[in-house]
Image: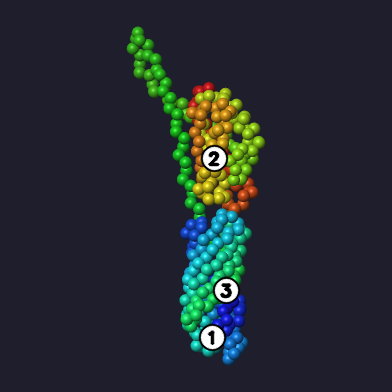
Amino acid sequence: MFDCPECLDNDWYFGLRGGYNFTEHWGIEGLLGYVPAESNAHSYDGQDVDVYRYGLEGLYHFMPKSKFVPFVAVGIGGKRVDGPSGYDDDNRGMFDYGVGFKYFASKNVALRADVRHDLYYESDDLDNNLEYTAGLTILFGGAKKMAAAAAPPPRIVETVPVHVPAPAPAPVPAPISEPTPKVVLVEFTDTHFEFNKSALTPQGKEVLAENIRTLKANPDMNILVAGYTSASGSEEYNQKLSERRATTVRDALVEGGIAPERLTRIGYGERMPATYEPFPKDLESKAAKSNMRVLFTIIVKEGTK
């Protein structure tokens, strides 16, 4: 939509954008556009006028991990108008700002709509245009880095005394090999934590009660309580949520009679998922639910009771 002093009819705008996202929130885009307009000036009414648009914009995205991603944009650039008179055929510097949104139909494809207000000087006067555009966004690259594997739990070393009879010398006993630790995993499945919550569901409390009985019957077990989350949400938020989930389970074990010194709590956030999530925005997927869990890592020595 052109300002009145340009004497141009409003017309379709065709364009292409290419950009790069530095973070989940911040990105930059370059743009090229073309408007096949017509003049409505008295002497050139109805004659073709070519308008070219170019520029560079910075974008800030809100809710970058959701399907609906609104954003704001600010940029600089310019336009060139090639008309029948040739009088105003030159480049004009331009400042623009506006808003838009992307709606992700899949992981890498989104529908997009934008509104921009363009400001520029024409004959020492500040004029403006409005742009309304709709299109398709396709994401390339940006593979998520694999999280570093967590260090394995430390081995439990136990000293075994050797008795040597006093009356007669005895051969040096052969080294006694230490028992090999066994690692037992007890997993809370997707029914035990709802999305974005650290409280146990009723079914989760029943399973935890069964585990408390097992742990009381095996007092030599030391337990690492590890919390996890799905990939939805920021990494910082998921880290804190996983720690809250691990704390919930640890506190419930203590309330159930398990000594606190037997328990260690840790949160892994969205790292080391049980199932890869191809679409993190799909909160109801089986993959997402399988990662809303807490694991017990229990180290038991061979031969202990």
First in sequence: mark 3 or mark 2?
Answer: 3
First in sequence: mark 1 or mark 3?
Answer: 1
The residue carrying mark 3 is: 130
Name the residue at 49% across, 78% down: 121
Name the residue at 54% across, 33% down: 250
Disc 2 crowd rating (10 Å Cα; few below 14, some 14-19, many 20+) is: many
- Amino acid bearing label 3: Leu
Q: CA distance from mark 1 to mark 2?
A: 65 Å
In the image, residue 10 sits, relative to residue 212, either above or below, namely below
Residues under numbered marks 1 and 2 in contact, where contact means CB atoms less than 8 Å apart: no
Image quadrant where one finds the N terminus:
bottom right
Q: Secondary structure at mark 2?
A: helix
Q: Outermost residue toward the left?
A: 169
- Residue 194 picture location, percent across and down: 62, 43
Q: Outermost residue toward the front?
A: 125
In the image, residue 280 sits, relative to residue 304, either above or below, namely below
Q: CA distance from mark 1 to mark 3?
A: 20 Å
The residue carrying mark 1 is: 83
Q: Secondary structure at mark 1?
A: loop
- Residue 54 picture location, percent across and down: 50, 74
**Which of the labelled discs sits on residue 244, or is there none?**
2
- Residue 153 picture location, percent across and down: 47, 35
- Residue 39 picture location, percent across and down: 58, 85
Q: Outermost residue toward the top?
A: 167
